[in-house]
Image (cartoon, helix red, strand yellow):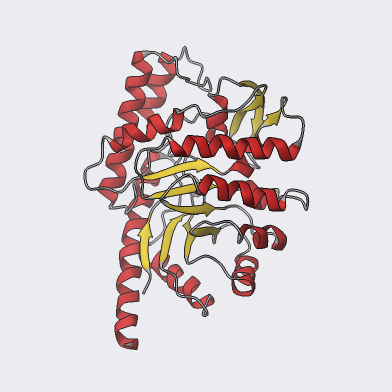
Amino acid sequence: MTDIVATTPGLYPLPDWAKDDLSDLKGHQKHDLIDGDEGAAVADAYDDVRAEFVADQRDAGLDRIVEGQGRWDDMLAHPLTVHDSVETGGIVRYYDNNNFYRDPRVVGDLDASGDVAAELSAAADLLDNDVLQAVLPGPYTLADLATDEHYGDEAEFLDAVGDFLAGEVEAFPAHETLFLLEPSYVTNAPDDDLNELASETIDRVAAATDADVVVQTYWEAFEETAYAHLMDADVDAVGFDFVAADRDTNLEYINELGTKADIALGLVDGQNTLVEDAGTVAERVDWVHDQIPAQEFDTTYVTPNTETFYLPVNKQQAKLSVLAEAADIAADADAAETEVEA
């Protein structure tokens, strides 16, 4: 019997009131990054955003609560764009969609900044009996989104980014789960020279926490060699996009090469405003389990396939509720099936 957990990869859309207030507070520069020198009014606004994100997740009944990353104007590049050794360059398209971020150009040594840890600590202060989940870009993705103007070698740069993220994680408050978001691992897979190192850097970041670590990929399916090397990383789960990616390819690698004891399933569309039916999502959970007959997972995470900042707030809130309800339905069905088999 698998423990079915409803959660998200974070990066929520800002409420409309926050967009308006923060635009005014930041001099109508909507894409301006707020760093450690942000004014008190801006910091207070983000505190209110964080509280709203936590309340939304609690109201929906999610099993893991994320901070929501309201300050991450540059999305997954954020942990670098706030770093003292990074200069922000021009606007770059975020993968193949209509979102943009400022190119983080690394111009000096990377060391832990504590920025994400401070956000997580603020979120933890809002929790009662809720379970905190940390979210970070994975090291391969963060290196892929950045420009190296300091280390001068692709492998050395990836290694440095891994050390940087491991240092960030060491400063985190207590958390049950860590999601490392690695879309680049499938959209721009490591080449032969980096495959082993990419897996090793993920392993290093995972080793910095006692929490369960999920490497969440999305938008595309794995390449075989990259997936095989990722299996060497000591993580608890790998996440697969079952909305946008080629599901047959992912299932082929899972069944041929195996996977971790836990699994994360991207089953709710994080980019489409159509709100799924919870029963249908629960059926998708069961369907994926049926396609992997050789393995019974300890934990199955049910998530959107991507971040949800693409969505209007009301649609995102509705999808949070769908995730929680779907996980409950799937858990009940799994328990009933286990009882019958017994």
**Which quadrant is the N terminus positioned in?**
bottom left
User: Which residue is rendered at x = 52% and y = 39% of the image?
Assistant: 166
Q: On the image, which quarter does residue 123 sit in?
A: top left
**Residue 113 spot, x, y in % from top left:** 49, 26
Can residue 67 be seen in this snapshot? Answer: yes
Give above or below for 253 relative to 194: below
Give above or below for 36 relative to 16: above
**Residue 179 spot, x, y in % from top left:** 47, 48
**Residue 192 spot, x, y in % from top left:** 78, 53
**Which quadrant is the C terminus positioned in?**
bottom left
Q: In this view, does 135 lie to the left or right of 163?
A: left
**Residue 149 spot, x, y in % from top left:** 73, 25
User: Which residue is rendered at x = 56% and y = 28% of the image?
Assistant: 111
Q: Nearer the viewer, residue 295 or 221?
A: 295
Residue sitting farthest toward the left = 128
Q: Which of 28 and 171 is in front in this view?
A: 171
Q: Which of 309 and 46 is in front in this view?
A: 46
Q: On the image, which quarter does residue 328 sit in?
A: bottom left
Can residue 271 be seen in this snapshot? Answer: no
User: Which residue is rendered at x = 69% and y = 35% of the image?
Assistant: 157
